[in-house]
């Protein structure tokens, strides 16, 4: 789990677009984790303020915390989610290397 979290956050920290749009099942296949674990992890990391997740509700991009049930969020808009790395997530990335040791 920690390796998955570290790698996921490190990928979000790569230079490019500030907020990225993905289908959640793409992440599941890419990181080799079950989709249910991935979705639960994303919701948890959003609650921990490591990332911000938003999904289209038919009218607007709605933040994760505004959905009555997180499972509905992942079923909307063909499974697309918008993800942005927050400062706490970036700090975790900066504090570790791919092996998990402190950076020098």
Image (cartoon, rainbow, N blue to C red):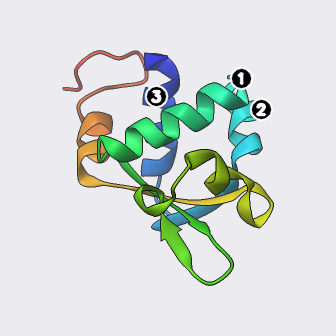
What distance separates the C-alpha of mark 3 from that of mark 2? 15 Å
Image side of residue 4 versus residue 58, left or right: left
Q: Are marks 3 and 1 in contact (CB under 8 Å)?
A: no
Q: Are marks 2 and 1 in contact (CB under 8 Å)?
A: yes
Q: Earlier in the sequence, mark 3 or mark 1?
A: 3
Image side of residue 33 versus residue 13, left or right: right
The front one of 73 and 95 is: 73
Percent position of residue 71, x then y: 64, 45
Few, some or many residues within 10 Å of mark 2 (<14, 14–19, 20+): few
Secondary structure beneath label 2? helix
The front one of 59 and 39 is: 59
Percent position of residue 32, x then y: 71, 23
The residue at the far right in this view is 78
Work out whether residue 42 can be spotted: yes
Label at residue 32 = 1
* Above or below 41: residue 25: below
Percent position of residue 40, x then y: 54, 33
Label at residue 93 = none
Secondary structure beneath label 1? loop
State the quadrant of the C terminus: top left
What distance separates the C-alpha of mark 3 from that of mark 1? 12 Å
What distance separates the C-alpha of mark 2 from that of mark 1? 5 Å
- The residue under label 3 is 5
- The residue under label 2 is 29
The front one of 42 and 84 is: 42
Residue at (29%, 47%) from the top-left corner?
49
Residue at (43%, 28%) from the top-left corner?
6
* Above or below 89: residue 37: above
Q: Are marks 3 and 2 in contact (CB under 8 Å)?
A: no
Residue at (30%, 46%) from the top-left corner?
90
């Amino acid at each position: 789990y920690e390796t998955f979290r570290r790698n996921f956050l490190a990928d979000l920290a790569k230079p490019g677009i500030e907020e990225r749009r993905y289908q959640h099942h793409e992440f599941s296949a890419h990181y080799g984790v079950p989709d249910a674990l991935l979705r639960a992890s994303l919701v948890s990391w959003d609650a921990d303020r490591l990332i911000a997740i938003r999904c289209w509700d038919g009218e607007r991009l709605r933040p994760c915390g505004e959905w009555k049930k997180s499972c509905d969020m992942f079923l909307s808009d063909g499974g697309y989610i918008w993800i942005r790395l927050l400062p706490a997530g970036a700090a975790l990335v900066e504090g570790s290397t791919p092996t998990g040791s402190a950076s020098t």
